[in-house]
Amino acid sequence: MIQFILKKFMFMLLSMFILISATFVLMNAIPGSPLQTEKATSDEVQRNLEAYYGLDQPMYKQYLVYLGNLAKLDLGISMKKKFQSVDKMIKNSFSYSLKLGTVSVITSVLAGTMLGIIAALHHRKFLDNFAMIIAVIGLAIPSLVMAPLLQYVLAVKIRIFDVSGLNDPMDYILPTIALSSVPIAFIARLMRSTMLEVLHSDFILTAKAKGLPGHIVILRHALRNSMLPVVTYLGFLTANVITGSVVIEQIFAIPGMGKYFVQSVVDRDYPLIMGITIFYAAILMLTRFLADIAYVLVDPRIRVSGGKVES
């Protein structure tokens, strides 16, 4: 098990190094200087700014300096935000993205799992059809369409919720629904198909033959084995919801990382782009790493041998 964890961890570090290198090279390959503005500046001011940010150095020197600062957890200074620290900007904004993402992940797993279980236990009946209709609607409408639709109906027309902001618990409802609609639908369909297969397995039939109550069979045996694909998807879900709320944060005017990410691309703010990209990538890789470990721990049929997963 330790060898398996170390192997996954080393692959995670290698992937992060490749991502950092590729992002750095691609940004510097774009013609022009990120310090150029519409306002006229003297050549001397331009040179001083480039020297301050190290842009007057060859690219390989800039790269080595950046890696050295990154090793000290220093993400640099923003080029456009009045010399604000990228670390501080991410720290101040991520709390909003984390809160919204956490609520959305919990909502997605609970609602999707419940819909999938209900659909599987009432196979080809009304509740099954109803749950799958909800799932199809959720998959068909992307979050960038769902969000303004919810705003228009529930905030503008009916006026149950505020149009924007994240000031009280009620403000979480609309962006959470917009973020969770697709994951709920995906988990519901995944849970339904997996549970239908598990319910017809030999060990479930054996448990029923022994006279175990139905709820014990479902909760202790069927649910645990049906959750394995959901656990695998949970790593992607967590990262995608937390980091994928860029559009939702813009629509609902939430002061999260999405605001800085979009603006950094428009402004060509190299340190901020690099900082947010690395931060997002770290979350994605860490959640995938934890999901791989959880998958081995949850499934009793899986064992680790020689750093490899065997079933």
Image: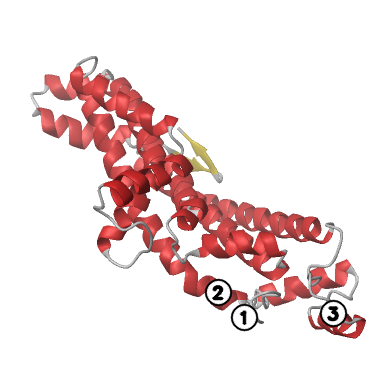
Horizontal side of residue 251 vs 218, given as left or right: right
Q: Amino acid at mark 2?
A: Met
Percent across and percent down for residue 196 are 29, 21
Helix, strand or loop at disc 1?
Answer: loop
Residue 152 vertical position relative to residue 65 in the rendered view, above or below: above
Q: Residues within 10 Å of mark 3 (few under 14, many from 20)?
A: few
Residue 287 at x, y = what percent? 48, 53
Pick the front one: 304 or 181: 181
Residue at image coords 53%, 49%: 4
User: In the drawing, what numbered circle is on residue 89?
Assistant: 2
**Whole-Å distance between the Cαs marked 1 and 3?**
21 Å
**Residue 235 visible in the displayed image:** yes
Q: Which residue is mark 3?
A: 41
- Residue 106 higher or lower than 262, as above or below: above
Relative horizontal placement of residue 86, taking residue 138 as reference (left or right): right
Can you give x and y, in whole percent of width and height, for residue 81 in the image? 64, 76
Q: Amino acid at mark 1?
A: Gln
The numbered mark, 2 or 3, whose residue comes first in the sequence reads 3
Q: Earlier in the sequence, mark 1 or mark 3?
A: 3
Determine which residue is flagged by label 1: 84
